[in-house]
Image (cartoon, rainbow, N blue to C red):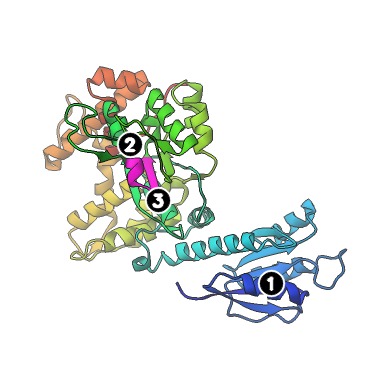
Amino acid sequence: MKELVLLVVDDDSLVIQSVKMALPEQWRMMGAQNPTDLPERGFHAALVDMHLTGNLEKAEGIDVIRRLSQRYANLEIIAMSGNLDRQLMEQCLKAGASRFLAKPLSLEELGLTLGKIEALFQMQGALTRSTQIGVKWVGDSAASKDIHRKIASLRDEAGPILIEGESGTGKEVCAQLVHQQQTRPGPFVPVNVAGVPENLFESEFFGHVKGAFTGADQNKIGLIEAAQGGDLFLDEIEALSMPLQAKLLRFLESGEIRRVGAKESLHVQTRVIAATNRNLDQLVRDGKFREDLLWRLSGKKVLLPPLRDRKQDIPDLCRHFFSLDKFRKKEIEEEAMQALKEYAWPGNVRELRRVCEQLILVAPLPVVRKEDVLQSLRPSSGTGGAVTAGAPLDLSRGLSDLVNSFEAQVIQTALERHGDIDEVARVLKISRSSLYKKIKDHNIQWKSEE
């Protein structure tokens, strides 16, 4: 990343020199002791003292923050003061500061704060420079900017992280971006918990030694150990049974694992990032999720908004998904884009991507029209695409689409009738993990009975 510049506004030259000496290597400093003589441009963040004339009764720094925030919309401003009065700190935030540091400054805390600002710039740069980062959060709406800031705030943070959001909102993308904010990222190991058979959980997560059970013909490291020095991403954490939740909690508390069949424990430095599309507080009340595990996971939490709450991002998302096909170039008419914005998107970004991929294939012209969009949305818009007993079949949809639609309808009906995931799996005669996968594949939205 290019060099970043910090503007320090403080009447104390010793503070300016101390900050200059403590800056991370990718930062350099511009100093200003006179609040009326600020540089016009050339800096990415500002550190502003509140009392710039020695008068502790007057916080001139608030006016400086207000002028800077009005002049530079995306400037990251850090307020600092030895006066930790609650009203003063709130005035700083209202004026445009995003952070407040106490004086005397902790240079270690300043370095950590600048690291988070650098991570935020990397996030924002990922909107246009995708080659610099493995994945990117597409969109520039107010909701997306809030996500950028939350992800950047987790840079180099230890301990578990919980990502919440409806199915299809981008929880794995968020997890990968959180991982990439680390100064030394290490490995990223993603796991769909619902897809791990319960009887294989310990072997898969903790590993096993040779001879531990029939078929264990060699030592095997588990997923936790494979993520040593990095992040283990546990998607659909709610699918973990109560006994297995206890085993995960034990690792989170101690940092130790024991391979199946081994006598000695191993200490592993792996951060757990968990994700869920369910209300874990409700599952705790229902007795289906451990309260102590929820406490351990949710110390640092990111809530992802559904696509219906960030529809301003739909044009950016569509352009992104269209750009993934290097051979078929498509543009989209304004009326077609408006139709996409008016749709409810129960399957969120995942459903939008499926629709974009379908439009690339089926739209007959280089320009996607409104009628193309409506035709692609019809199978997902409730009864219009459902396969109903006794109703005439639209054979033009093809066998695969018809079968998938019927399967989704059956699962939706069973969920509405029984509510409990275990009961639905029993009635449909499929495993719990298979049911979770089908719910996710079909973008089915449901809530358990309270």
Residue stretch in magenta: 223-234
Residue 131 figure quarter:
bottom left
Q: Is residue 246 left or right of residue 196?
A: right
Kindly state the secondary structure of the residue where label 3 is placed. Answer: loop
| Kind of residue indicated by mark 2 | Phe
User: Vertically, is 47 above or below 202?
Assistant: below
Residue 346 visible in image: no
Q: Nearer the viewer, residue 242 or 280?
A: 242
Crowdedness near tag 2: few (<14), some (14–19) or many (≥20) residues, C-alpha within 10 Å = many
Residue matched to label 1: 18
**How many numbered badges does the structure rendering display?**
3
In the image, which disc is placed on residue 230? 3
Residue under the point 20% across and 35% down = 404
The answer for how far apart the CA atoms under marks 1 and 3 are is: 33 Å
Q: Nearer the viewer, residue 328 or 245?
A: 245
Image x and y of residue 255, in percent: 45, 39
Q: Is residue 26 left or right of residue 447?
A: right
Crowdedness near tag 3: few (<14), some (14–19) or many (≥20) residues, C-alpha within 10 Å = many
In the image, which disc is placed on residue 205? 2
Crowdedness near tag 1: few (<14), some (14–19) or many (≥20) residues, C-alpha within 10 Å = few
Image x and y of residue 237, in percent: 39, 35
Kindly state the secondary structure of the residue where label 2 is placed. Answer: helix
Mark 3 or 2, nearer chain start: 2
Instruction: Say whether marks 1 and 3 touch (CB < 8 Å).
Output: no
